[in-house]
Amino acid sequence: MPPAIKAADLEAHLAGTVLCWLGGQGMEQMEEFVTPWGVADVLGIRFNIDRVQARIAAGHLDPVGDAHAMQLLLSLPTGGKPKRISDVARKFEPLLGAALFERAVKNLIRKRFVVQEGASLVRCTDWMPYHEQLVAVELKLRRVDEALAQARRHKAITAESYVGMPAVIAERVAFTERRADFEAAGVGLLSVQDDICKVLIPPNLSTKTVIEAQELCAAEACWRRVLKAVQH
């Protein structure tokens, strides 16, 4: 009798197959992106080469930073319009505290995402966002309810959120009353068998649930991988 296949090996196989599926669509991929609500097992990103090149030309080679830094950056107007530091501080110091706010501003200036002009800040990220598509996949062997709940949370970073499961489980979900739960949540379902991924339930691509700062933080998690791909 052949030895039993360990759950960890099955999960690794699921992840590998989904990563190949994303790569076959021309996306860069990464595993285990940490969100405020848990870990997204797999992310795929399709980047805009012109915007990536513009970012490189601007010298913006570092990731923006954490969610606080991203929220602060997004609070500044685009188009080179200045915003007084005191106005930004009035919004963020109650949330971050004075010391953390000052550190976040200094880091954005050091990384050249922001320029200080007297008592004002100017945002210099005309290339943002640098991605055209972001895909999140939650992988589970069996626990459908848990997988669906987590994939629903991932709708805060991208409308294109899936649950990936072994084919026998995925088909049981897709062709029973459980399908309605996925459709109501706007979450897609991937069937994974051998080295093949098949979309059994497409996700709802409405962006109503997407939180811009969280989406861009997820994209930034892929930035070094994208930068390496472009430079090589």
Image (cartoon, rainbow, N blue to C red):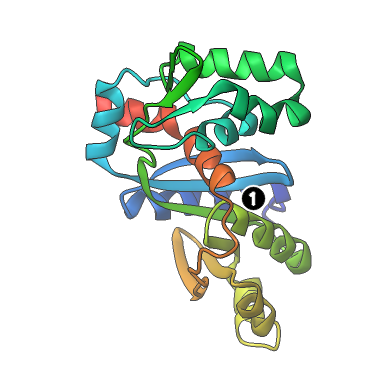
Say if 225 sits above or below 42 in the image.
above
**Relative image position of residue 60 (x, y in whole percent):** 37, 21
Residue at the location (55% across, 69% down)? 188
Q: Amino acid at mark 1?
A: Glu
Q: In front here: 164 or 60?
A: 60
Quarter location, residue 78 = top left
Quadrant showing the N terminus = bottom right
Quadrant showing the C terminus = top left
Quarter location, residue 209 = bottom right
Residue labelled with disc 1: 11
Residue 95 showing in the rendered view: yes
Q: Is residue 31 left or right of residue 116?
A: right
Q: Is residue 177 left or right of residue 124?
A: right
Quarter location, residue 217 = top right
**Relative image position of residue 26 (x, y in whole percent):** 31, 49
Q: In front here: 15 or 55?
A: 55
Residue at the location (42% across, 23% down)? 113
Residue at the location (29% across, 21% down)? 58
| Mark 1 secondary-structure assignment | helix
**Relative image position of residue 184 (x, y in whole percent):** 65, 79
